[in-house]
Amino acid sequence: MHRRSFLSGAGAGLAGAALVGAGVAVRSARPVRPGAVEPRPSIAPTSAPPTRTADPTGISADDGLPGIATIAGPVEHRVTSLPAGPLYWQIETFPTFAAANAAATQYSMTLDAEGRGWLFTLAHQGDQTPGATHLAEIGPLPVPEAPEYLLQLSYQSRAGKVVGTEHSHPGVESWYMFAGEQTVQFPTLDQELSVSAGQGLMGPPANTPLRIINTSPQERRAFNLFVLDYTAPAQDTGASVAAVDAAFKQSFLNGDLDGTMDLFAPETVEISPFGVFPGKDAIRKSVDTFIRANPGFQVSFSDSQIVDNTAVHHVTLTSDAIKNAGVSNVSLIHTLVVTRGKIVMLAQQLDLADPETARYSIGLAPQGR
């Protein structure tokens, strides 16, 4: 594949009693509505990136957050019009969140993160806010024509080597990297963009498919910035939450591990009281290990409650090992999050309201569980 890189704007036993699940929730940014493909113009460099002397967070590969997590936000701001273009994201900081808020304009968003106040303003090239520390300028942005706009901001973490699913937006996404690095691929354009800490990166015009990859083994932290057509209709980009939930239950009941894992997105994370398993390979191994360690394994599922992109159901497990522990079965609560027709997070927790499960959990405590 021929690829070109562009920088746009830079500045200073019961091995979990878990099928594939978790008991700790990872917060995810609200998915942005996708659209269809449009041609993309070239994105030219606007300035050279600064020399990176150290990781500003001191994050190591061992203490980062699992999978994909939203650390702060999302912040959303609806506007009926934008300033005359060309427009750029001006990224600045203040010592405090209050100071950043005080300097905000009609086209600004603010966030409290990493011990300072952040100000992101949609403005013109070279515009700077008095009293602010200016970090980056990203643009000129390929802003879509729309009767109403949504400005959106979040601060996200991606674990090392996480590969995102292909998706698109009804507008333009940009990034300011705080720590780590990432590559953004555009499959339909045979192009990719790469960016490191301290640099800004601009995405393609509306409705261009993209995929975000953390190319480093260490955690990547970045501010995600959107200028979206608020009136763009949501589109069906995959099976519904109910359909994925039902397929997950049936595949597992059938003992179809391949079919079960096909329901998961590449960036899936499993978090359970017994461990965190980022990625499909790690999850598959945890499932396979559990089943092998539990002869006589049987499972049943309750009906699910579905809200937005989340399904919740109970799972009842039994096996020879569970019975040998002095209980007839163990009950868990599954929280299954679906995005674009794939499972992006499956959380499990022991249902301590169930007497058998509560009794079983006592036996876990001496093991530091």
Image (cartoon, grey):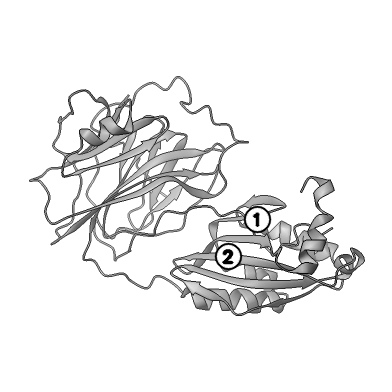
Type of amino acid under label 1: Asp
Q: Is residue 299 above or below residue 44?
A: below
**Secondary structure under the numbered disc 1 in the rendered image:** helix
Please give the name of the residue rendered at 18% of the width and 44% of the height, measured from the top-left corner: 107
> What residue sits 39% from the left and 59% below the top?
31
**At 49% across and 48% down in the image, what residue appears?**
69
Label 1 crowd bin: few (<14), some (14–19), many (20+), radius 10 Å: few
Would you name the residue on which mark 1 appears?
281
Circle 2: element type: strand
- Residue 340 visible at all: yes
Residue occupying the far left of the picture: 84
Residue type at numbered disc 2: Thr
Residue toward you, 321 or 330 = 330
Is 324 rendered above or below residue 301?
Answer: above
The residue labelled by disc 2 is: 335
Q: Is residue 269 above or below residue 341?
A: above
Q: Position of residue 330 (x, y in %)?
A: 77, 68
